[in-house]
Image (tube, helix red, strand yellow):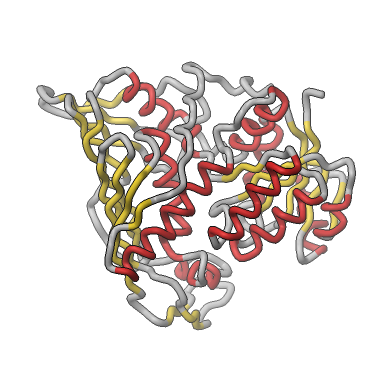
């Protein structure tokens, strides 16, 4: 077998890019889509040429589906993943891995018990931008990383998203929504994190939707929307990270890494491309570095292809669930540190993902 049959559960906004990109990867094919609203699944199946449109239960019970892409809302990530694993299917989910550590642990333990793979978004760290940064760090271009900064600061999703309420529920907020992109990139570039602290606040108790579909509706906010944190890495580096849905404007970078020999500007970790900028200690200005890896456009689904490749080759996936669990544990730890007024010692651990081969091209996952 050199290809797996894949089913998608959840036909919301994010599903379209997975369906569009599936044709780029030759080691899996999408054979079915499912949604809570069956008509939506049928519409997606017709639009993208998918053979079957199912209810969720029907897809989970189909013996021909080897692998589930779980694109449901965070609140049911664990429920769907566990049911898929119980039905003998590998699972790759959108971020976060689950809402609680307990749910996530159950998912990982069940996958291990069943001899199945579980992986998780984001896969943007596999794109050409961050993979180029990884190569530069491994080559010692800026020396040993000493510190880093990371900023994701916006006004909130109610201005544009057609149905933004879940962003303000438990399991949402800027940390659980966008934190996985930033934390995964930092772990891929610098390594696992051993200790965190932070301050988190819920600035507004209520939000008003101004996007067209639900204009004027009110959202009750149930999770912090301003989170300032400090991350201590196992290798001794330290980072400052700010996640906010309460900021109108700023002039800060997405991610910068500061080393013993210079500094690096890392591209937006919610994208796959560049630019990557370097300024060594004696340089008078920043220099843009040509990207050394492919997959620089919107390549969502790349993580699925990489995980399928790992399944077929019987190796650990770069998007393995232990990485996603470490990220989830860190995010909860930042909230816990704020609530408890002390550092959180991170008990979880993951291996730093192996870099992709230099010069990787579109046909790599054929």
**Residue 353 on image: x %, y %:** 48, 31
Image coords of residue 308 (percent x, y): 69, 32
Image quadrant holding the N terminus, namely: top right
195 and 29: which is toward the camera? 195
Left or right, 20 with reference to 295: right
Res 45 visible: no
Q: Which residue is found at the position 52% from the left and 49% from the top?
A: 325
Q: Depth check: give the residue in front, 297 or 117.
A: 117
The answer to whether residue 349 of the structure is visible from this angle is yes
22 with respect to 294 (left or right):
right
Q: Quadrant of residue 239?
A: top left
Q: Where is residue 47 in the image (x, y as percent from the top left)?
A: 77, 49
Residue 90 position by quadrant: top right
How many numbered discs?
Answer: 0
Front in this rendered view, residue 326 or 182? 326
Q: Quadrant of the C terminus?
A: top right
Which residue sits at x=23%, y=39%? 147
66 relative position to 228: left or right = right
Q: Where is residue 230 in the image (x, y as percent from the top left)?
A: 27, 53
- Using the image, determine if residue 315 lies above or below residue 337: above
Residue visible at 45% across and 79% down? 208
**To which quarter of the image does residue 243 belong?**
bottom left
Tell me which residue sits at (87%, 48%) in the image: 52
Vertical arrangement, residue 89 with respect to residue 218, above or below: above
């Amino acid at each position: 077998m050199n290809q797996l049959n894949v089913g998608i559960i959840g036909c919301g906004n994010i599903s379209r890019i997975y369906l569009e990109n599936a044709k780029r990867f030759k080691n899996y094919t999408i054979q079915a889509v499912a949604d809570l609203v069956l008509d939506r699944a049928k519409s997606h199946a017709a639009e993208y040429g998918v053979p079957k449109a199912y209810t969720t239960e029907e897809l989970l019970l189909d013996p021909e589906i080897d692998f589930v892409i779980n694109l449901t809302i965070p609140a049911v990530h664990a429920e769907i993943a566990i049911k898929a694993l119980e039905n003998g299917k590998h699972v790759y989910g959108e971020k976060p891995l689950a809402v609680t550590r307990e749910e996530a642990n159950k998912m990982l333990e069940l996958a291990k018990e069943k001899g199945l793979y579980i992986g998780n978004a984001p896969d943007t760290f596999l794109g050409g931008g961050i993979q180029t940064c990884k190569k530069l760090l491994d080559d010692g271009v800026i020396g040993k990383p000493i510190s880093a900064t990371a900023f994701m600061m916006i006004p909130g999703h109610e201005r544009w998203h057609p149905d933004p309420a879940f962003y303000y529920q438990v399991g949402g907020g800027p940390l659980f929504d966008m934190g996985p992109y930033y934390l995964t990139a930092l772990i891929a570039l610098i390594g696992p994190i051993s200790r965190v602290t932070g301050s988190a606040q819920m600035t507004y108790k209520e939000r008003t939707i101004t996007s067209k579909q639900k204009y004027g509706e009110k959202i009750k906010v149930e999770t912090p929307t301003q989170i300032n944190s400090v991350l201590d890495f196992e290798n001794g580096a330290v980072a400052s990270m700010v996640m906010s849905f309460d900021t109108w404007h700023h002039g800060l970078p997405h991610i910068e890494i500061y080393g013993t020999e210079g500094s690096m500007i890392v591209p937006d970790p919610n994208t796959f491309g560049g630019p990557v900028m370097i300024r060594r200690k004696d340089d008078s200005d920043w220099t843009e570095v040509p990207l050394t890896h492919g997959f620089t456009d919107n390549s969502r689904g790349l993580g699925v292809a990489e995980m399928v490749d790992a399944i077929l080759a019987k190796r650990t996936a770069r998007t393995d669930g232990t990485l996603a669990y470490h990220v989830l544990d860190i995010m909860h730890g930042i909230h816990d540190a704020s609530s408890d007024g002390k550092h959180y010692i991170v008990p979880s651990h993951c291996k730093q993902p192996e870099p992709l081969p230099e010069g990787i091209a579109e046909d790599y996952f054929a």
